[in-house]
């Protein structure tokens, strides 16, 4: 009895009683354990894509033969004309890169339409989502413009609409005409595989990849035929033929990231993993 | 116990001047300046910022992360006061709730500015994407702000104006409101433990997931770090409790002497010191694993490049390792030191370390970004410099924080209902 009283008075005086210390220590340990559980589950929750994939429908893909690319940037320009983009808004970037042996080549990079898209996983409002046919789409009316997808995309494929959309793209009419409505200021946009051509085209019985009206603008515009498009599940589609004929096929940062892009590259012939061979 | 509020005054010649009106005037100027910036943001969109497609997150996100982190004492002391029922921290707990509320509302304001479509700020609440950390953070912040508000309402309604203001007799409607507010705060006070549990859960969840926001970005080498969530939680606790210590010394020891025992301050300081040392230990091993013992060339390249344009490594060794250790040791020995000048000086360091962690974290992956080319992937440096509009909005939210804090510490009855005998 006296002991409890003493403890109480001590506690009221403000000195830490042993019980208080144990309480705080317990709470701390609990907090630490909880954060571990939380961090573990959040990091592990990158589960396979949420949309149930059908294996019967088409799965659109693109291939780019680096050997055939001459760096003319017609793909970029056609894309800008069709999507009505200003000059500094680029969905499909063409850059000059080099191999280990120093040889340079052109790398044209549309959106990869990954099967495991980091952008789809991080979007807080499901404004970006993956369709059953593999196309990663944007819902421009839902996007809040937080730009997390931009930060998450390992390919820099996403462009933010910093300004009001322009009336007519500078690349129009030379490379085509606007085929899609303008996106509002303040949303993130990106390459759609020209879904506005694919969907109506398929509805009319056209074959994307073969019929120009149902094929992405960059593929149609490519003067050297470096690009092929089509249904990856159809062995007779142009892309399946290109991929079957190629000696090797690669995807960007494939092994490192497991994003499983739908855009395939035919690597340069002179490429070798042997760094002692001079190109 | 009778407590009267003593307003700190500055001696100018023979006069004792209360700087409060001038201080508020300055802050109002800051708000006006900030509002002009906010006007341009809402009118012209984010093109008025220095952000780009390469660096889409900048100053505002850093302010947002820092202010949430510095509100981190709210859940710790919410739990200590309402759950563990350690009574002598009651007043300090109220202050912690205030700091939490201010931190989160500041973050909410600056986040809304940062949206490309600010009027769609409510979308995450309606369109759920539970796989997104940003969705989880938004939901937690919204819910936690509600909890903090519920915890703050009883503190506000304890103000004597709610019970015996001359207007209460003149206007019956005010009497009804006063009665309602007392019933509400009574029930909210009763719900304290429940609110504390909910608050602690929400807070732990998203303080961790703020770190995970970056840590899940496996495409950006330097960010993909499994210990980031844990580090973010502990650094929020360390920085938040130190800020609470500084604020409570000012609010209780300077302005309301005698309300809180010095021993309670020492305990807050010791808690802050212990967590700071724990955090620094975690931080050090994180560095060792990701930098020193690691074979990850991307991270070493990124660090090297960042060092060419900023004192990146130095901020780690001084700001996040050396100084916090000193501060932690000083704070841990608060009972022996017993000098509040030293203790407050030491307590300034962990909040700075918390801010440095957040700012570095936000910028490393964007400023030094990995390229996607297949054969010779490398790290490229991008630049970002905030425009005056970004600084103006920053000034706006910081002024808001300071105004609310100054008003609250001057007028809110932290001393509780039973002590308000003037």
Image: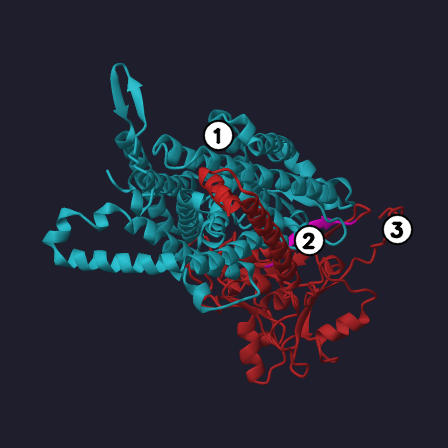
Chain colours: A red, B cyan
Q: Give the range drawn in magenta.
A: A92-99
A67 up-or-down from B160: above or below: below
From mark 2 to mark 3, how far is it between C-alphas? 21 Å
Residue A93 magenta-drawn? Answer: yes
Q: What's the residue at 71%, 49% (across, down)? A: A97
Specify the label residue B372 is tagged with: 2
Tell me the distance, in whole angstroms, between the alpha carbons under discs 1 and 2.
Answer: 48 Å
Residue B34 is situated, as x and y percent measured from the top left of the image, at: 35, 41
Q: To which quarter of the image does residue A220 belong?
A: bottom right
Residues packed near mark 2 inside 10 Å, few (<14), some (14 to 19) or many (20 plus): some
Name the secondary structure under disc 1: helix
- Of all chains, the one bearing label 3 is A
Crowd around label 3: few <14 · some 14–19 · many ≥20 (10 Å): few
Q: For the stretch drawn in magenta, what is the main secondary structure?
A: strand
Residue at the spot x=79%, y=57% of the render? A268
The residue indicated by pointer 3 is: A274
Circle 1 sits on which residue?
B344
Q: Position of residue B63 (x, y in %)?
A: 47, 43
Residue farthest along the front direction in this orientation: A1
């Amino acid at each position: 009895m006296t002991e409890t009283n003493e403890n109480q008075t001590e506690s009221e005086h403000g000195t830490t009683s042993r019980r208080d210390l144990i309480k705080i220590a317990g709470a701390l340990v609990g907090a630490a354990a909880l954060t571990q559980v939380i961090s573990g589950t959040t990091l592990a929750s990158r589960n396979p894509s949420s949309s149930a994939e059908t294996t019967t429908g088409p799965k659109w893909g693109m291939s780019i033969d680096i050997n055939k690319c001459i760096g003319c940037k017609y793909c970029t320009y056609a894309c800008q004309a069709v999507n009505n983009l200003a000059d500094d808004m680029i969905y499909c970037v063409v850059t000059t890169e080099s191999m280990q042996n120093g040889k340079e080549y052109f790398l044209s990079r549309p959106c990869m339409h990954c099967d495991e898209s980091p952008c789809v996983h991080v979007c807080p409002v499901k404004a970006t989502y993956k369709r059953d046919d593999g196309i990663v789409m944007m819902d421009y009316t839902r996007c809040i413009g937080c730009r997390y997808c931009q930060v998450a995309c390992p390919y820099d494929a996403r462009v933010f609409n910093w300004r009001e959309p322009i009336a007519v793209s500078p690349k129009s009419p030379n490379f085509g005409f606007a085929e899609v409505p303008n996106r509002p200021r303040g949303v993130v946009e990106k390459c759609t595989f020209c879904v506005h051509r694919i969907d109506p085209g398929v509805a009319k019985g056209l074959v994307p990849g073969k019929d120009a009206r149902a094929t992405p603008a960059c593929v149609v515009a490519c003067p050297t035929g470096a690009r092929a498009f089509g249904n990856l599940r159809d062995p007779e589609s142009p892309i399946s033929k290109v991929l079957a004929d190629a000696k090797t096929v690669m995807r960007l940062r494939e092994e490192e990231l497991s994003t499983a892009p739908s855009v395939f590259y035919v690597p340069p012939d002179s490429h070798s993993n042997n760094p002692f061979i001079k190109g | 116990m009778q407590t009267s509020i003593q307003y700190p005054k500055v001696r100018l010649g023979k006069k004792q001047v209360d700087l409060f009106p001038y201080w508020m005037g300055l802050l109002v100027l800051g708000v006006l300046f900030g509002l002009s910036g906010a006007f341009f943001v809402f009118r012209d969109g984010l093109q008025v910022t220095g952000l780009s497609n390469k660096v889409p997150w900048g100053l505002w996100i850093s302010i947002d992360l820092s202010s949430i982190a510095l509100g981190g004492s709210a859940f710790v002391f919410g739990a200590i006061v309402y759950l563990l029922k350690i009574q002598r921290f009651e007043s300090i707990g109220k202050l912690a709730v205030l700091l939490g509320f201010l931190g989160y509302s500041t973050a909410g304001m600056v986040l809304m500015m940062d949206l490309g479509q600010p009027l769609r700020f409510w979308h995450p609440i309606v369109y759920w994407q539970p796989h997104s950390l940003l969705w989880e953070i938004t939901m937690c912040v919204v819910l936690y702000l509600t909890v903090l508000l519920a915890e703050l309402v009883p503190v506000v309604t304890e103000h004597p104006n709610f019970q015996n203001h001359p207007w209460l007799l003149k206007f019956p409607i005010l009497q009804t409101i006063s009665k309602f507010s007392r019933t509400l705060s009574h029930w909210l006070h009763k719900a304290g433990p429940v609110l504390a549990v909910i608050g602690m859960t929400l807070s732990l969840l998203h303080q961790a997931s703020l770190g995970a926001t970056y840590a899940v970005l496996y495409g950006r080498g330097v960010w993909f770090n499994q210990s980031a969530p844990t580090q973010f939680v502990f650094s929020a606790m360390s920085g938040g409790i130190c800020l609470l210590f500084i604020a409570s010394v000012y609010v209780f020891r300077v302005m309301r002497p005698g309300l809180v025992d010095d021993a309670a301050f020492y305990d807050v300081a010791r808690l802050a010191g212990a967590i700071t040392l724990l955090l620094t230990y975690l931080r050090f091993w994180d560095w060792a694993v990701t930098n020193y013992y690691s074979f990850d060339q991307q991270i070493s390249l990124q660090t090297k490049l960042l060092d060419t344009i900023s004192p990146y490594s130095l901020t780690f060794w001084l700001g996040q390792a050396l100084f916090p250790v000193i501060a932690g040791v000083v704070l841990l020995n608060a009972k022996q030191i017993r000098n509040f000048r030293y203790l407050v000086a030491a307590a300034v360091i962990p909040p700075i370390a918390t801010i440095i962690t957040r700012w570095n974290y936000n910028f490393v992956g964007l400023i030094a970004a990995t390229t996607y080319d297949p054969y010779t992937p490398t790290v490229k440096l991008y630049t970002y410099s905030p425009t005056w509009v970004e600084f103006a909005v920053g000034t706006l939210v910081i002024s808001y924080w300071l105004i609310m804090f100054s008003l609250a510490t001057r007028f809110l009855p932290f001393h509780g209902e039973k002590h308000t005998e003037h």
